Image: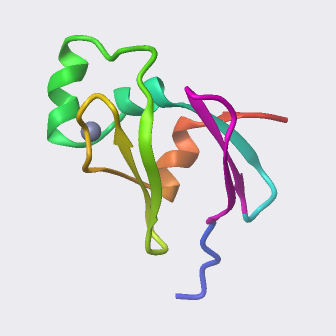
Amino acid sequence: MGVNLIYPVNLSQISRYSFQIEWSDGVSQEFRLSELQQACPCKVCLEIVKKEVDPLVLADKISTVGKYGIRVQFTSGCLHGIYSFSYLRTLGSSCK
Ligand SMILES: [Zn+2]
């Protein structure tokens, strides 16, 4: 395609409630798990968001999905939310 895709070169946990991604273009962003779940595109979370996301929600596991995105397994029961890298870029707050 000739397009340079932006991907995470490093993903690190900042605290129990947040983590940081360093992108291939040098940008670093911070993500709070509760804010991420609020923006989760899966069916379960769309239901939860109508009520309230626990601000102290944790992640059991954060894993990459191919070259496309990451999947976050929240302790609150969401296991299937996949965030594409481009979507994540719109969600994170800049650390610089
Ligand atoms: Zn979800």
Ligand 1 located in image quadrant: top left
Q: Nearer the viewer, residue 93 or 76?
A: 76
The image quadrant that residue 77 belongs to is: top left
Q: Is residue 16 magenta?
A: yes
Residue found at x 62% / y 66%:
7
Residue 49 vs 37, above or below: the answer is: above
Q: Is residue 41 left or right of residue 9?
A: left
Q: Nearer the viewer, residue 2 or 62?
A: 62
Q: Position of residue 8 (x, y in %)?
A: 64, 61
Residue found at x 73% / y 65%:
24
Q: Position of residue 57 (x, y in %)?
A: 41, 23
Task: Give the residues drawn in magenta, as a range.
Answer: 7-23
Residue 32 vs 69, above or below: the answer is: above
Q: Is residue 38 left or right of residue 95?
A: left
Asked which colour scheme the image uses, the reply is rainbow
Name the chief secondary structure element in magenta: strand
Q: Is residue 64 left or right of residue 28?
A: left
